[in-house]
Image (cartoon, helix red, strand yellow):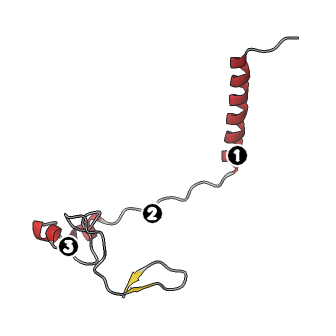
Amino acid sequence: MFTPPRSRVLLLVSLALAGGWVALMAQLPPAPLAPPPPDVATVLRDYQPVTADRLTHPDADNWLMIRRTYDGWGYSPLTQIVIPPGDGLYRS
């Protein structure tokens, strides 16, 4: 009895899986379009320059660094957090 080489079997299985993947992806709806970027004039009008003072003393609700301060203090100084049902977090 003839047994096909292992590489040929692997190739056929790979092609079958790829074909199934392509068929599955063809049935999915297209991804939604990304919203248009904001108007540059509006962004620049509201822009606040990043200064050394803003980096060393950040606003409580506007972190400029990932951990808020240079010493890595990542805790929020906000005192009240309100969680409406079904929504995200909001500052009160």
- The crowd level at tag 1 (other Cα within 10 Å; few <14, some 14-19, many 20+) is few
Per the image, the residue denoted by label 1 is 24
Q: Quadrant of the C terminus?
A: bottom left
Instruction: Describe the element under mark 3 as helix, strand or loop.
Output: loop
Q: Which residue is mark 2?
A: 35
Q: Position of residue 42 (x, y in %)?
A: 27, 70
Q: In screen coordinates, is 86 left or right of 45?
A: right
Instruction: Please give the label number shown on residue 58.
Output: 3
In the rendered structure, which disc, 1 or 3, sits on the residue that comes first in sequence?
1
Which residue of the protein is positioned furthest toward the right in this rendering? 1
User: Label 1's element?
Assistant: helix
* Residue type beneath disc 1: Leu
Location of residue 35 in the rendering, given as x and y in whole percent from the top left corner: 45, 63
Q: CA distance from mark 1 to mark 3?
A: 49 Å
Res 51 quadrant in image: bottom left
**What's the residue type where badge 3 is placed?**
Pro
- Dot 3 or dot 2: first in sequence order is 2
In this orientation, which residue lies closer to the viewer: 5 or 28? 5
**In the displayed structure, does residue 34 sit left or right of residue 52?**
right
Crowding at mark 2 (Cα within 10 Å: few <14, some 14-19, many 20+): few
Whether residue 25 is visible? yes
**Real-space Cα distance between discs 3 and 2?**
30 Å
- Left or right, 3 with reference to 39: right
Of marks 3 and 2, the one in the foreground: 3
Q: Residue at x 51, y 58 (%)?
A: 33
Residue 4 % position (x, y): 78, 15
**3D distance between C-alphas at marks 2 and 1:** 27 Å
Q: Is residue 31 left or right of residue 69?
A: right
Q: Looking at numbered disc 2 in the image, what kind of residue is underneath it?
A: Pro
